[in-house]
Amino acid sequence: MSESNKQFFDAILIIAVLIGIILAYFIVTIIRYHRRYIKLQKERIFAEITMQENERKRIANDLHDSLGPLLSSVKLNMNSIDVQNTQDQQIINKASRHIDEIMTSLRQISHNLLPNTLQRNGLNDAIREFIKDIESKHKVQIHLYLHKEVKLEKEKEIHVFRMIQEMVHNALKHAEAQNLYIGINEEKEHLQVMVKDDGKGFDVSKTKSESRGLGLKSMESRIEILNGQLSIESQPNKGSSYFFSAPL
């Protein structure tokens, strides 16, 4: 090989190495940017959900601690009024019944925003209470398989509860299920939850791409916060299965 050809090939080699270094730099930069973007997205989602849960807690406490006692006081004062007219007494009695209905609705709203059982007794009792409440209002039979009394950190319990809550509501509202099966287990320091129904089922990929609701998105966001994995299996007319696992 002549000296000129050798210099030519050396120049090409140097250029190729430089191009390779530049490409590697851009690839590494893109990967770093993507990782940072994902991290920021997770932090944003975590902040939004945390703020949402804090707001729910605040409203629930306001309803329970402020409006509840106030309405009770109003009812007590109304019932203490001494009236002689029968018609006036009937009006007071009717107003008193309305206050009772309002107080019942406030307690239900407060409970839906943040179940007191979850705060007091933990995830297991909260799920049992939630199932009992659902069965009392809907024509559905829920089979709970709680293989072990799972204990989680308080900040994790609310996310697990909300995910189970969303899965059950999906089965009732959209799938029109008659039977629900909920399994909760702890294995190898991981929480494992399965929710299965015998409802109408749906096309998972199509629903994910077309859904404008926050249900599936909320579940995916919460499982990211828990550093877990979520899988959904369903077919039209063949029911649906949700499974998620998260480290304890």
Image (tube, rainbow, N blue to C red):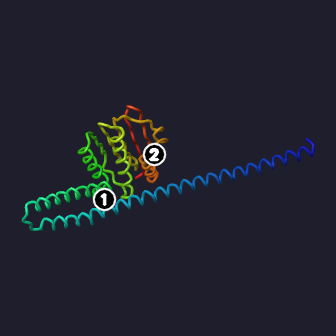
Q: Please tell me in which quadrant of the rendered image residue 172 appears.
A: top left
Nearer to us of marks 2 and 1 is 2
Which residue occupies the foreground of this view, 174 or 39?
Answer: 174
Please state the horizontal and vertical placement of residue 192, each as a whole percent of the image: 38, 46
| Residue that badge 2 annotates | 212
Question: Residue visible at 26% across and 58% down?
Answer: 106
Task: Classify residue 114 as left or right of residue 212.
Answer: left
* Residue at the far top in the pictured view: 237
Callout 1 amino acid: Gln
Task: Classify residue 17 as left or right of residue 248.
Answer: right
Please state the horizontal and vertical placement of residue 237, each as a whole percent of the image: 38, 31
At numbered mark 2, what does the secondary structure look like: helix, strand or loop? Answer: loop
Please state the horizontal and vertical placement of residue 98, each as a whole percent of the image: 19, 57
Q: Residues within 10 Å of mark 2 (few under 14, many from 20)?
A: few
Which residue occupies the foreground of this view, 81 or 209?
Answer: 81
Vertical side of 78 occupied by 170: above or below: above
Q: Are marks 2 and 1 in contact (CB under 8 Å)?
A: no
Q: Dividing the image into 4 quarters, which one contains the N terminus?
A: top right
Task: Classify residue 237 as left or right of residue 98.
Answer: right
Q: Residues within 10 Å of mark 1 (few under 14, many from 20)?
A: few
Q: Which label belongs to residue 119? A: 1
Question: Residue visible at 48% across and 41% down?
Answer: 210
Question: Residue visible at 45% across and 58% down?
Answer: 48
Question: Residue visible at 26% across and 64% down?
Answer: 67
Earlier-in-chain disc, 2 versus 1: 1
Callout 2 amino acid: Arg
Please state the horizontal and vertical placement of residue 184, each as a whole percent of the image: 34, 45
Q: Which label belongs to residue 186? A: none
At numbered mark 1, what does the secondary structure look like: helix, strand or loop? Answer: helix
